[in-house]
Image: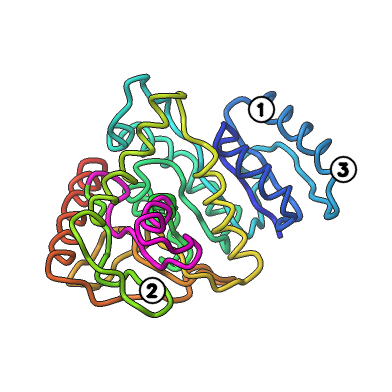
């Protein structure tokens, strides 16, 4: 069970460390522009894994060393400005980077599942499918997974139900046009009432990532953990239902774009796309998200 992480920065290393801690991978390859730093990170993790029950081999490498990976996670990104506030501002720089690295990765690991973590994740996931030629069930982005978990935490406090028992999702764009699918939010089989106050919690969840960035200069723990959650579901064939950015091929009349919806993740990648019935308002929001992401895709493609 080999996992390659491209971009061993803060997010990539939280991902690598989590995989080592949980013992869900057997081999991890770290690929970055700074080979010396990647080697240092690999050495440090190898020293840490000596304390774990399940041994994991960690090493640094080049793009060709991703050969025969089961999962490839893309965490690499161009630098973000200190006053960063719009993920789409990274689109041009990160899209150019992907043009250089993704075809090489696809050639060395033609059967891999590809997880995009870099932003703007919906746009780059779409581009990744085109650059690699992978079938859409093997290309996905972390999308609104962290947003959904933040929303569940907020919603759980509002309804006094443990967050783990709340089933609620953020749909659409990982960005300005994400929205809470309150029409399908439930706990214990009972629908949760759709109120303006509960919908407003989506805006709180949406703003949280930017707030963290402005206070500490990055976000790494939640997104690194979310990526490991997806990868573990693939490696262990867990069939988890996870909101991810995936190819939309007709759901609610939307095509040829990547947006977040709940999907079942297992050994084959995206094994099923769930297509719940949304309210008229939510359908409008889904179309707005598609239009927003599509405009950025058109600008880089």
Q: Nearer the viewer, mark 2 or mark 1?
A: 2
Query: Which quadrant of the rendered structure holds the N terminus?
Result: bottom right
Sort mark 1 into few (<14), some (14-19) or many (20+) by Cα contacts within 10 Å: some
Outermost bottom residue? 189
- Residue 7 lies, in percent from the top left, at 55, 36
- Helix, strand or loop status at disc 3: loop
**Among the 4 quarters of the image, the one containing residue 84:** top left
**Is 11 displayed left or right of 29 in the figure?**
left
Q: Nearer the viewer, residue 106 or 23?
A: 23
- Kindly identify the residue that appears in the image at 24 percent across and 73 percent down: 251
The label nearer to you, 1 versus 3, is: 3
Taking the magenta stretch, the answer to whether it contains residue 64 is no
Mark 2 and mark 3 residues within 8 Å of each other at the beta carbon = no
Instruction: Name the residue carrying label 3.
Output: 50
Residue 34 in picture, x, y percent from top left: 61, 25
The CA span between labels 1 and 3 is 23 Å
Q: Are marks 1 and 3 in contact (CB under 8 Å)?
A: no
- Give the number of the disc on residue 273: 2
Q: Quadrant of the C terminus?
A: top left
Residue 86's image quarter?
A: top left
CA–CA distance between discs 2 and 1?
A: 38 Å
User: Mark 3, residues whose alpha carbon is within 10 Å: few (<14), some, or many (≥20)?
Assistant: few
Give percent across and percent down for residue 194. 22, 66
What colour scheme does the image use?
rainbow
Q: Which mark is residue 118?
A: none
Residue in the foreground of this view, choosing between 217 and 32 = 217
Q: Is residue 187 above or below residue 215?
A: below
Find disc 1 in the rendering and name its residue.
35
Mark 2 crowdedness (10 Å alpha carbons): few <14, some 14-19, many ≥20: many
Task: Give the residues in magenta.
Answer: 150-176
Count every numbered label the image shows and give the total.
3
Determine the secondary structure under disc 2. strand
């Amino acid at each position: 069970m080999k996992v390659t992480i491209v971009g061993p920065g803060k997010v990539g290393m939280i991902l690598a460390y989590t995989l080592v801690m949980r013992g869900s991978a057997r081999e991890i390859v770290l690929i970055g522009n700074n080979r010396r730093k990647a080697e240092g990170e690999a050495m440090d993790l190898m020293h840490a894994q000596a304390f774990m029950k399940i041994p994991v081999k960690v090493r640094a490498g080049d793009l060709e060393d991703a050969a025969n990976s089961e999962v490839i996670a893309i965490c690499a990104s161009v630098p973000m400005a200190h006053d960063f506030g719009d993920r789409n501002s990274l689109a041009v720089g990160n899209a150019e980077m992907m043009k250089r690295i993704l075809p090489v990765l696809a050639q060395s690991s033609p059967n891999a599942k590809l997880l995009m973590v870099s932003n703007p994740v919906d746009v780059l996931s779409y581009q990744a499918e085109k650059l690699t030629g992978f079938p859409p069930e093997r290309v996905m982005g972390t999308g609104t997974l962290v947003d959904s978990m933040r929303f569940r935490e907020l919603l759980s406090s509002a309804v006094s139900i443990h967050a783990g028992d709340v089933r609620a999702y953020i749909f659409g764009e990982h960005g300005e046009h994400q929205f809470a699918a309150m029409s399908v939010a439930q706990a214990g089989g009972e629908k949760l009432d759709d109120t303006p106050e509960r919908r407003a919690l989506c805006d709180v969840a949406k703003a949280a990532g930017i707030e963290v960035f402005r206070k500490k200069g990055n976000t790494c723990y939640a997104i690194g953990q979310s990526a490991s959650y997806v990868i573990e579901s693939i490696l262990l064939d867990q069939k988890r239902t996870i909101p991810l950015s995936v190819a939309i091929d007709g759901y609610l009349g939307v095509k040829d774009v990547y947006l977040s919806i709940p999907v079942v993740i297992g050994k084959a990648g995206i094994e099923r796309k769930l297509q719940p019935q949304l309210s008229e308002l939510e359908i409008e929001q889904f179309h707005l998200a598609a239009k927003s992401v599509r405009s950025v895709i058109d600008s880089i493609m």
